[in-house]
Amino acid sequence: MKRPPIGFVARRVRNNLWELLWTHVLTAGTMAMALFIFGAFMLLHDNLQHLLKGWGDQIHINAYLEIGLGEGAQRRLLNRVRTLPEVERARHISQEQAWKDFQTALGAQSSLLNGLPRDVLPPSIEISIKPAFRDAAVVEELAGRLKKEQGIATVEYPQEWVERLSLVILAVEWAKWILGGVLFMATFFIVGSTVKLAILARQDEIEIMQLVGASEALIQAPFVLEGMIQGVAGGLVAIGCLGAMFGLLRHQMSGPALLGALTQAQFLDLRSIVFILAIGWLLGAAGSLFSLRRFVKRWKSHFGER
């Protein structure tokens, strides 16, 4: 099959886009809406994963020591904990340091501690886990061993919250693909309907091209190229809207009342942006080709194989 002349195809695409401008704008807008929703789920998913990784790096087991345990016994216990294979580092927190940390955490409300004895908080050992051992079962088993150590009263760790966040990330990922699939199917048929309108508007022109021996590639190329343009335009609009939404939300999250981790949200990386544009490009091309097939079959049956 001969390659269609680029100049001829470009002129037809330009004329078609101009004559059916609002139809193409509406189609590109529909694609932009679908890609925006899909991109929003990608943005949420990526930032939740970033948050989970940050939390994973900050997972600590807090082993609270018995009040009244001597300094020598605390030092020996700290050394035993540091020798455990799962432990990356262990830090001893005295009662005085625990009191200061609690005051810092309360901030402006630290006056609530007035009148309380400074030794009300027990000393503790803050234990960081090596990345290779940051697994729920391993951390739970380590916590069980620590509880049996003489001099340790209680052991606490935030693994339950990390597991819940992992479930949220999984749910967002499934929702991204399921909802994205539904939206893309709807957009696919909308693009096909736009192509049908363009074909019907130029049916006489297409039949004349068939009569003078125009190839299938020459007839189909402008419509496929228009679909690609619509897809890329929709993707660019979606990314622009996502950027504006992200900037607005990040500005709103900069207040002191919100968690510091939320202010570290990141926008989509270059690979994700290219992925969204590629989906738009493929949607436009596939929708156009799908719609053209029926008309090609009709042309062949009407004019016969050439």
Image (spheres, rainbow, N blue to C red):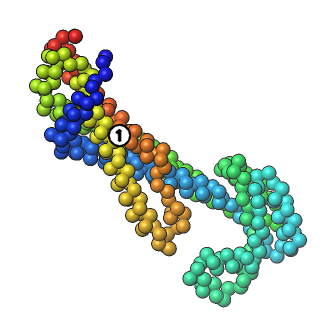
In the image, residue 197 sits, relative to residue 73, either above or below, namely above
Kindly indicate the quadrant of the structure image that contains residue 144. Answer: bottom right
Label 1 crowd bin: few (<14), some (14–19), many (20+), radius 10 Å: many
Residue type at mark 1: give it.
Gly
In the image, residue 25 sits, relative to residue 244, either above or below, namely above
Rendered residue at 85%/60% (across/down) = 80
Query: For the view shown, which residue lies furthest in the left direction?
Result: 204
Label 1 residue SS: helix
Query: Is residue 290 shown to the viewer in this render?
Result: no
Query: For the view shown, which residue lies furthest in the front direction?
Result: 7
Number of marks drawn: 1
Residue 95, image x, y percentages: 75, 77
Query: For the view shown, which residue lies furthest in the top direction?
Result: 305
Q: Nearer the viewer, residue 157 or 214?
A: 214
Q: Nearer the viewer, residue 209 or 227?
A: 209
Query: Is residue 92 shown to the viewer in this render?
Result: yes
Left or right, 87 with respect to 30, comes to right
Query: For the view shown, which residue lies furthest in the bottom direction?
Result: 115
Residue 102, image x, y percentages: 65, 76
Kindly indicate the quadrant of the structure image that contains residue 199. Answer: top left
Rendered residue at 30%/39% (across/down) = 229
Q: Nearer the viewer, residue 261 or 248?
A: 248
Rendered residue at 26%/36% (across/down) = 226
Task: Please identify the quadrant where the N terminus is shown.
Answer: top left
Residue 288, image x, y percentages: 27, 31
The residue at which mark 1 appears reads as 280
Q: Nearer the viewer, residue 249 or 117?
A: 249
Rendered residue at 24%/18% (across/down) = 215
Kindly indicate the quadrant of the structure image that contains residue 221. Answer: top left
Residue 289, image x, y percentages: 29, 27
Left or right, 65 with respect to 7, comes to right
